[in-house]
Image (cartoon, rainbow, N blue to C red):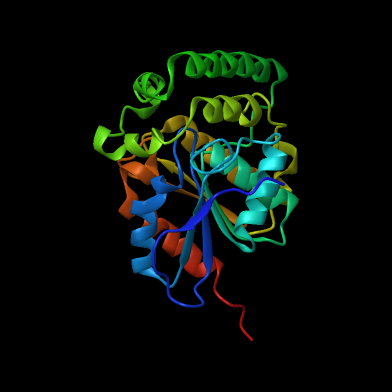
């Protein structure tokens, strides 16, 4: 089992519930710092940011999303799990494979994978091309094009965390695309009813595609799931509106992690 790099994000009140934060592609655990700082100010939480396989201080992925979820379980333990994009897909798999560890689940800008085999094949081909570009051109040049995509049009350069992204390596990012991309992942739509934990599906209100996917995930999970849209945010809501996202997380976690009446 590969040991993922996990780091606390600052002082927490003793005994506060652990909240494990998993970032998206090309980011690192440092991407969560603005949200984690605000979350600690709102409640007695212990935020722990984990570097996804192939990112930051974590090793290359040893397998697909299933293996990544097992490695995340070892790093995070019993906790509330918050994942963005690729991190959301890994957290979702963890919630299905190890419901005993997931006290609450928050997915931001995430999906259950691609149900259509042809679409998965196209995505695998596209991700392979991207992986080859990273290996050829390096991380800095790749990031110029990656962050210029329309998907990130609402993300201000000052909030993009480019310096943290440059800590990644071509080998790590290429391996993450090849092993953890949506084209290689087994779709999870048919298993969504197996999510037992309270679930919150978050998307930026300006990100219409993932707002629709959040609704789809909530319907699939069932009545213990709900959707929250972050006004004024696009796909990277946690980077664009960290204060608002922290407030959304606190409101949800305060209720989801409340001890059962004795």
Nearer the observer, 241 or 199? 241
Viewed as shown, does residue 27 lie left or right of 78? left
As displayed, is residue 131 above or below residue 16? Answer: above
Q: Residue 86, percent across and down?
A: 55, 37
Relative image position of residue 178 (x, y in whole percent): 63, 24
The image quadrant that residue 232 belongs to is: top left
Quadrant in which the C terminus appears? bottom right
- Whether residue 64 appears in this view of the structure is yes
Residue drawn at (67%, 45%) of the image: 2
Residue at 53% x, 65% y is 18
In the picture as drawn, the residue positioned furthest to the bottom comes out as 262
Q: Is residue 229 above or below residue 60?
A: below
Give how far across and how far down residue 74 sits, in percent. Answer: 67, 55
Identify the residue at image location x=37%, y=24%: 140
Foreground residue among 239 and 223: 239
Which residue is painted at 54% across and 14% down in the image?
A: 132
Q: Is residue 162 left or right of residue 229?
A: left
In the displayed structure image, the side of residue 183 where residue 152 appears, left or right: left
- Residue 61 lies in quadrant: top right
Report the label total: 0
Instruction: Please state which of residues 73 and 253 is positioned toward the viewer in this rendering.
Output: 73
Whether residue 198 can be seen here = no
Q: Find residue 30 and report its horizontal and vertical position in percent.
A: 40, 47
Q: With respect to residue 221, does 154 lie above or below? A: above
- The one nearer the camera, 182 or 204, is 182
């Amino acid at each position: 089992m590969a040991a993922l790099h996990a780091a606390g994000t600052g002082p927490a009140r003793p005994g506060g519930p652990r909240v494990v934060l998993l970032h998206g592609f090309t980011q690192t655990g440092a991407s969560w710092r603005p949200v984690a700082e605000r979350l600690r100010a709102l409640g007695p939480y212990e935020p722990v940011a984990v570097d996804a396989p192939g990112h930051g201080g974590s090793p290359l992925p040893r397998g697909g999303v299933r293996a990544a979820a097992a490695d995340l379980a070892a790093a995070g333990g019993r906790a509330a799990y918050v994942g963005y994009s690729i991190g959301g897909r890994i957290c979702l798999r963890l919630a299905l494979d190890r419901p005993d560890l997931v006290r609450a689940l928050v997915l931001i800008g995430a999906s259950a994978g691609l149900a259509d085999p042809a679409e998965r094949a196209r995505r695998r081909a596209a991700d392979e091309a991207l992986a080859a570009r990273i290996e050829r051109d390096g991380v800095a040049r790749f990031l110029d094009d990656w962050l210029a995509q329309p998907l990130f049009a609402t993300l201000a350069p000052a909030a993009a965390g480019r310096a943290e992204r440059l800590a990644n390596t071509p080998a790590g990012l290429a391996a993450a695309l090849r092993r953890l991309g949506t084209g290689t992942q087994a779709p999870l739509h048919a298993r969504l009813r197996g999510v037992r934990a309270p679930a919150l599906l978050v998307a930026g209100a300006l990100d219409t595609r993932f707002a629709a996917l959040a609704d789809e995930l909530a319907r699939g999970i069932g009545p213990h799931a709900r959707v929250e849209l972050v006004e004024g945010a696009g796909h990277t809501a946690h980077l664009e509106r960290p204060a608002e996202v922290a407030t959304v997380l606190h409101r949800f976690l305060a209720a989801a992690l409340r001890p059962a009446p004795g």
